[in-house]
Image: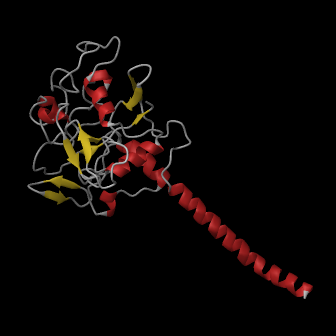
Amino acid sequence: MKRGAQRLAAALAPALLLMSGLASAQASTQASTQVRPSAQAGAGNVTWVRIGSGAGSFEIARSETTVAQFRRFVQATGTRTLAEASGGGQVYEAGWTTKPGWHWAAPFGQPAADDEPAVHITFPEAQAYCRWAGGRLPSDAEWARAAYLEQRENPPSPFIAGRRYALPSGASAEGAQCLDDCGPAARQRALNHGARLWRGHGHARAGSTPAGVNGLFEMGGNAWEWVDGAAGAAPDAERRTRGGSWWYGAAQMREEHAQYKAPATAVVYIGFRCARGG
């Protein structure tokens, strides 16, 4: 009996080894696709700007999350966005319209440059990227503080330390990427990759407009940005977007303007930036 048991164990060993390898490979695959903070410092290649000093200070990304940054996240985690899975993101054309092939890597249906803002991103997808990059989405209060209150000790002209501005671009909308109110350069900067748009001209490359309050780029115009709300909000609760976009004029760039969307919204003019600390 003992010799027979040994023969049976020997016969089963290769199968058991194969099963163990399959289980290990499956666990490894599952682990690699879980969204968690990256162990590699600077995985998202985010340039952080400190807002304030001492208690209550935090850091925020200097520009909107770019296509190249989001691509690194996708490659590291195996993420497939809702816009990709649904066949395309959306744009408003006298009603919400799904555009086949429009997603973060091809915002207007054609491949985007690395430094274009990553749009067609849902709120949970933005959260997941920021966690992976070692941060989080900024709270609404943090975003507003960074966008409107100049906190550099010696800011370059025309910005004045301690002043609260009406717009993230400063006293004027000139230089931001918005519709009609932001000057002729906005149309010259606009990228839409040949798409026929019902309204507006398209976004600008991240960091291509003049730096605004606190030296941040495109906090006003270009793409709406998801911000986080109060802790404990229901998963399907509407989430606020800040800053306006290329589809709107300067009014939507103001601090008092409220705009909310369902968290699963994936459209051509909503992107995000991350924050950390605080």
Q: Is residue 86 above or below residue 240?
A: below
x 22%, y 13%: residue: 158
Number of callouts in the render?
0
Q: Is residue 174 above or below residue 37?
A: above
Tell which of 261 and 90 is nearer to you.
261
Residue 125 relative to residue 147: left or right:
right
x 68%, y 69%: residue: 20
Location of residue 137 by image quarter: top left
In the picture as drawn, the residue positioned furthest to the front comes out as: 232
Residue 140 relative to residue 37: left or right:
left
Q: Quadrant of the C terminus?
A: top left
Q: Is residue 176 visible?
A: yes
x 42%, y 48%: residue: 128
x 44%, y 19%: residue: 54
Tell which of 20 and 106 is nearer to you.
20
Residue 23, position as x, y percentages in the image = 63, 68
Q: Quadrant of the N terminus?
A: bottom right
Residue 243, position as x, y percentages in the image = 22, 35
Residue 45, position as x, y percentages in the image = 45, 36
Q: Is residue 192 visible?
A: no
Location of residue 53 by image quarter: top left
Q: Is residue 163 above or below residue 88?
A: above
Location of residue 96 by image quarter: bottom left
Color encoding of the figure: secondary structure
Residue 208, position as x, y percentages in the image = 27, 30
